[in-house]
Amino acid sequence: MPKPPLLQLAQDLEWLGCELEHYGHQHALLGYPQSGPIWESFCEKQRGVLVTANKVERQLKNVVRFNPSGLVGMEYPLKEALDSISALLEEVEEIKHCAVFAVQEIPSKVRAFTKMIVGYLQVMGKAPV
């Protein structure tokens, strides 16, 4: 069974976030130069995190916009489903903020976010086995 797109995006975001922190650390060790291969790699990873976070955000918003009936399960009322998606969207915003202003915090944020996505998908009955 293929991974749900939201889970794949969350895992991509986790990988990119950890790489961003690594290159951020390397960049700091070099004295924060504004050019060179480490700087270019850092900027590339930062863009990757922001682009992937935007994709996750769109995916979450599309769940509500195009198929709200799928949010309601037998034991998962609509209000809780929307609250869950709101919490996920808030976390995406926090990840974007960290990607720009607090790179050292991003690994723990993206790892926690992936766990949140897995939990959300399990409750919704969409998690891979």
Image (cartoon, grey):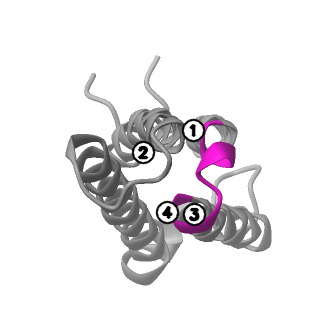
Q: Is residue 102 left or right of residue 18?
A: right
Return the residue at label 2. Answer: 13
* Label 4 – label 2 distance at C-alpha: 25 Å
Q: CA distance from mark 2 to mark 1?
A: 8 Å
* Front: mark 4 or 2: 2
Left or right of residue 80: residue 21: left
Residue type for callout 4: Gly
Q: Is 56 part of what is drawn in magenta?
A: no
Q: Please state which of residues 112 and 107 is positioned toward the viewer in this rendering.
A: 107
- The residue wearing badge 1 is 114
Amino acid type at circle 3 is Val
Q: Residue at x 49, y 63 (%)?
A: 70
Residue 32: x percent and y percent? 47, 53
Nearer the observer: mark 4 or 3; the answer is: 3
Q: Which residue is mark 3?
A: 92
- Give the Cα separation between the discs numbered 4 and 3: 22 Å
Whole-percent x, y for residue 110 in the image? 58, 43
- From the image, tell me which residue sits under label 4: 70
The reply to whether dot 4 and dot 2 touch (C-beta < 8 Å) is no
Residue range highlighted in magenta: 99-107
**Magenta stretch: includes residue 101:** yes
